[in-house]
Amino acid sequence: MSTSSEIFSANYKTDATFNAARRHSIRVRVLKIILPIAALIIALIFSWFTFLSAPGSVELVVLNDEQNSDGRLTMTDPQLEGYTSANKPYSLKAEKAIQNPSQSGVIELQNITAELPLGERGQAFVEAEGGFYDNINGRLQLNKPFVVKTNDGMIAKLASADVNLATSQVNTNDPVDIQRTGQRLKANIMQVRENGQVIFFGGGVHLIIDNTDQ
C-alpha cells in the first residue's frame, strides 16, 4: 500500500515532468519563429551585398529637375536579377538610387522591392521605403519602415535596421513585429550576431502563442 508521502512524491515528479515538457514545447515554438528570422536576415544581407557590389548592373544618369539641381547623380529604376550559388533565382529593384558627390561612397535607395530564395523551396518578399548604403564602411542603414514576407505566411515588420555587411550584424532600436499563424513576437530592440546564429530581443518583449487550432 502506498503511503501519502509516496503519492505526493509521484505527483511531484509528474508535475515536474509536465512542466519540463511544457517548457521544452515553448522553446520549440520560439525556435520555429526565430530560426526563419535568422534565415531572412542572412538573405537580406546577401541581396544587398550582391546588388550594391555588382559592376555595371545599372547606369548613373543626371536628372534635369529642380530636386537634382545640386548635381546629385541618380540611377532610375536600378534592378538586378540573377541566381544564387545554389542556382536559385533572386531579384532586387529600386525606384531610384541617388549619390551625392559630397558624400563619396554613400548611395541612397528609394522604394525597394526584392524576391529572395529562402531555404530549399521558400521565398521571401521585401518591401522597403528606403535606406542608405555606405560603400566605404560596408554598412546599410534602412532608416524607414520595411516589411519582409514569406510564402509560408510569415510577416516581419521593422521600423529601421542598421546592417554591417562586413560582420553580418544587424541592429535596430525600433519596434519589431513578427507574425506567423498562431504566433506573434514583438520587441523594441533586436540584435543579430554571428550570421544569424545569435539573436537578441529586448525592450518589452512579447511572445503570443495561440493554441486555438491545436
Image (tube, helix red, strand yellow):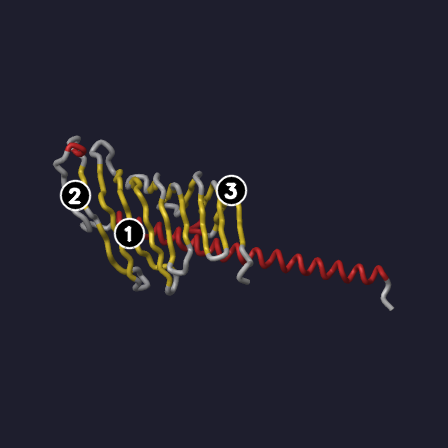
Residue 210 picture quarter: bottom right
Could you tell me if the residues under marks 2 and 1 are in contact, i.e. CB atoms within 8 Å?
no
Whether residues under marks 2 and 3 lie with C-beta atoms below 8 angstroms apart, the answer is no
Q: Amino acid at mark 1?
A: Thr
To which quarter of the image does residue 76 belong? top left
Q: Nearer the viewer, mark 2 or mark 1?
A: 2
Label disc, if present, on residue 202 of the rendered structure = 3
Residue under label 2: 60
Q: Amino acid at mark 3?
A: Gly
Q: Along the line of sight, which residue is nearer the eye, 64 or 161?
A: 64
Give the image location of residue 25, x and y in percent. 58, 59
Tell me what residue is drawn at x 34 percent, y 41 percent: 142
Residue drawn at (44%, 41%) of the image: 175
Residue that label 1 marks: 50
Residue 189 falls left or right of residue 74: right
Residue at x 32% of width, y 39% of height: 137
Q: Secondary structure at mark 2?
A: loop
User: Which quarter shows the N terminus?
Assistant: bottom right
